[in-house]
Structures are given as structure tokens and as C-alpha cells.
């Protein structure tokens, strides 16, 4: 499996924290944690230290560039691969999302969405693929007039994918998983591949 785009060069989080904050679904405590914060990397650190881990993953999902964000979602889903009856289908949809990361053509973007539709939009892998699709310039069929997605749609899909990956199986694993996911994201931000070893049963 190849790494994310520009793996040798550091990928920085967006510093437009104001555009990210509305999508974090913060309560009063969360807003107080980020009071006076101006940069995404500082916000990430504050949220993690405060134990607001799901909010921290939302920040990453919205602040990373689209390709890195989708790659991260795929990495998280690999770590907690499902043990149900649709393993082959879930692997296929994740591979479609990763193919878009490697080569972000409109063909690959639409192929990822087709795989997500086939999978029923019910898995972490499917929502990673939706994130790829929503990164493009139109949600309409190729022959139809363009219907641009909102700028935050990819972040929403990635955040949903990561949350689903964290919730698989025993609830007791959720916090440790989220911390591993955040470590993966920080590695991607620093220019790494962000890989996490797959969980053992």
C-alpha cells in the first residue's frame, strides 16, 4: 500500500480555525477549552489533553487537506477492520478510496462513490469513499449540470468514518483507538504515512 500524497513533505493543518470550529459540535466545556485558541495544531493539543477525543478527530477531519483526510480515514478503518460478513466488500470500497488518494481523477472519485453505494453507506470504509467523492467539483452525474458540494462535506464524511472505525467491537477499546487515530493524524501532519498496525482479535 502506498503512502499519502507528498509523504516526504510535511502536510500542515489548515490554520483557518474559524471555519473548522462550527463543525466540531462543541459543548460549553469544549468551547471553554478552546477559548483564545488561534491555530488548529494548538486546538488539537488542547482537545486531546482535555480528553475531548472525538472532537479532536473532527478537527483533524476538517483541517487536513482532502486527500490526506481520506487517507487517514482509510488508515483508521484498517486498524479496526470489521469482523462481519462483508469483509471483502469493505476492503473493496476502502481500496477504491485509496486509489483516489493515489490518483485523484474524477473517474476514481466517482468509482469510490459507486463502491460506497454498493456497500450501503454503513461502514467506516464507505464513508471514507464518500469523503473522496465530496472532494470534487460536482455531486451530479457527469452529464448533468454541476452541483458543487459544500467545502466542509469531505470533513463530515471523514469524521463519520473515523467515528465508525472507533466504535467497532468492544466499547472498552474506543478511547485507546481514538488516541491511536490522533497519533496517526499527527504523523500525517508531520509528513509521515500515518500507518497503524491492525488490531489483534
Image: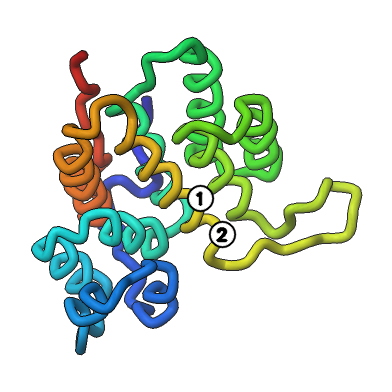
Q: Nearer the viewer, residue 118 or 109?
A: 118
Q: Secondary structure at mark 2?
A: helix
Q: Which mark is residue 51?
A: none
Neighbours of disc 1 within 10 Å: few (<14), some (14-19), many (20+): many
Horizontal side of residue 173 vs 60, given as left or right = left
**Which color mode does the image show?**
rainbow
Q: Nearer the viewer, residue 14 or 118?
A: 118
Q: Residue at x 21, y 22 (%)?
A: 199
Q: Residue at x 17, y 73 (%)?
A: 42
Q: Position of residue 31 (x, y in %)?
A: 26, 79
Q: Residue at x 56, y 29 (%)?
A: 96
Question: Is residue 99 among the parts visible in the rendering?
Answer: no
Answer above or below: position of 186 versus 115.
Answer: below
Horizontal side of residue 148 vs 39, given as left or right = right
Q: Quadrant of residue 80?
A: top left
Quadrant where the C terminus sits is top left
**Among all residues in the image, which is located at the extreme bottom?**
36
Which residue is identified by label 2?
153
Which residue is identified by label 1?
157
Q: Secondary structure at mark 1?
A: helix
Q: Residue at x 65, y 55 (%)?
A: 136
How many numbered marks appear? 2
Q: Quadrant of residue 23?
A: bottom left
Amino acid at each position: 500500500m502506498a503512502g499519502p500524497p507528498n509523504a516526504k513533505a510535511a502536510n500542515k493543518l489548515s490554520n483557518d480555525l474559524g471555519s473548522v470550529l462550527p463543525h466540531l459540535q462543541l459543548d460549553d466545556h469544549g468551547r471553554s477549552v478552546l477559548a483564545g485558541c488561534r491555530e488548529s495544531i494548538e486546538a488539537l493539543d488542547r482537545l486531546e489533553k482535555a480528553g475531548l477525543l472525538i472532537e479532536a478527530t473532527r478537527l483533524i477531519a476538517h483541517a487536513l487537506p482532502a486527500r490526506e483526510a481520506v487517507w487517514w480515514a482509510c488508515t483508521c478503518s484498517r486498524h479496526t477492520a470489521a469482523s462481519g460478513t462483508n469483509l471483502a466488500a469493505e476492503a473493496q470500497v476502502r481500496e477504491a478510496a485509496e486509489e483516489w488518494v493515489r490518483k485523484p481523477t474524477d473517474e476514481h472519485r466517482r468509482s469510490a462513490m459507486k463502491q460506497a453505494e454498493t456497500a450501503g453507506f454503513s461502514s467506516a470504509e464507505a464513508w471514507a469513499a464518500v469523503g473522496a467523492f465530496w472532494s470534487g467539483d460536482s455531486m451530479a452525474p457527469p452529464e448533468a449540470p454541476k452541483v458543487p458540494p459544500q467545502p466542509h462535506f469531505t470533513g463530515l464524511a471523514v469524521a463519520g468514518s473515523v467515528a465508525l472505525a472507533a466504535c467497532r467491537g468492544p466499547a472498552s477499546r474506543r478511547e485507546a483507538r481514538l488516541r491511536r487515530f490522533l497519533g496517526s493524524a499527527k504523523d500525517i501532519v508531520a509528513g509521515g504515512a500515518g500507518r497503524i498496525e491492525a488490531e489483534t482479535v
